[in-house]
Image: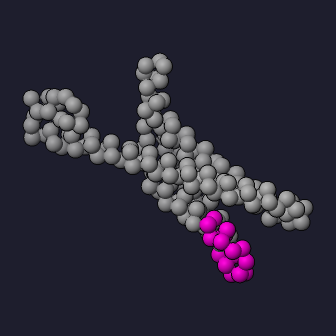
């Protein structure tokens, strides 16, 4: 009987179809691994974006009384970054569905638009230094990683192991 190395067993599939079946399984496995890698990177980028905005807010507490609109926008940006981190983490650890993929793309689009917009405003005004540039770069990276992570994910191996072995 034909042997499929990716499954480690005989397939029972006629030899002409073995390479097609094994290739499909291997492509799916590669896609899942690629998606999980993109989600892991997205989690790191989201953490960095959250930390950047949080540090900005903590270091400028007077902004809450002097420029409450600016402070509110920064708090909203922090919430978007944290929400993106949460959704990416949930997808990474427990798999996902179409709603979680759409939420990932939507949140990544929001943080990218907001951060790139802030970068452009700061560049036009000639203020801000490197911080708005980093924020814009993180926003673009988040969107690119969210696009790379559009494929379905499986639950992480540790979650699958706990479910099936009850450990």
The outermost residue toward the top is: 166
Q: Residue 133 at x, y = what percent?
A: 62, 70
Q: Residue at x 89, y 66 (%)?
A: 66
Where is residue 125? Give x, y as percent.
72, 81
Q: Report x, y in % for residue 108.
A: 57, 56
Of residues 4 and 16, the one drawn nearer to the viewer in this rendering: 4
The quadrant of the picture occupied by the N terminus is: top left
Residue 85 visible, this orientation: yes
Span of residues in magenta? 120-135
Can residue 121 be seen? no
Residue at x 20% of width, y 40% of height: 21
Does residue 159 show up magenta in the picture?
no
Chief SS of the magenta region: helix
Q: Is residue 22 left or right of residue 70?
A: left
- The percent position of residue 157, horizontal first and vertical second, equals 43, 32
Q: Which corner quadrant of the image does residue 4 belong to? A: top left
Residue beneath the point at 51% across and 41% down: 91
Q: Is residue 17 above or below residue 35?
A: above
Indicate the quadrant where residue 111 lies.
Answer: bottom right
In the shown orientation, is residue 124 left or right of residue 149? right
Height in image: 1 above or below 75? above
């Amino acid at each position: 009987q034909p042997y499929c190395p990716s499954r480690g067993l005989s397939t029972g599939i006629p030899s002409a179809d073995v390479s097609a079946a094994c290739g499909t399984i291997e492509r799916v496995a590669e896609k899942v691994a690629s998606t999980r890698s993109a989600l892991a990177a997205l989690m790191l980028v989201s953490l960095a974006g959250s930390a950047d905005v949080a540090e900005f807010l903590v270091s400028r507490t007077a902004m809450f009384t002097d420029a409450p609109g600016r402070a509110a926008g920064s708090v909203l940006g922090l919430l978007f970054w944290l929400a993106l981190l949460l959704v990416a983490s949930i997808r990474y650890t427990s798999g996902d569905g179409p709603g979680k993929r759409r939420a990932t793309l939507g949140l990544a689009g929001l943080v990218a638009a907001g951060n790139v917009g802030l970068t452009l405003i700061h560049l036009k005004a000639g203020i801000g230094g490197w911080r708005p540039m980093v924020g814009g770069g993180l926003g673009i990276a988040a969107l690119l990683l969210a696009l790379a992570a559009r494929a379905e994910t499986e639950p992480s191996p540790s979650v699958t192991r706990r479910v099936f072995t009850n450990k």
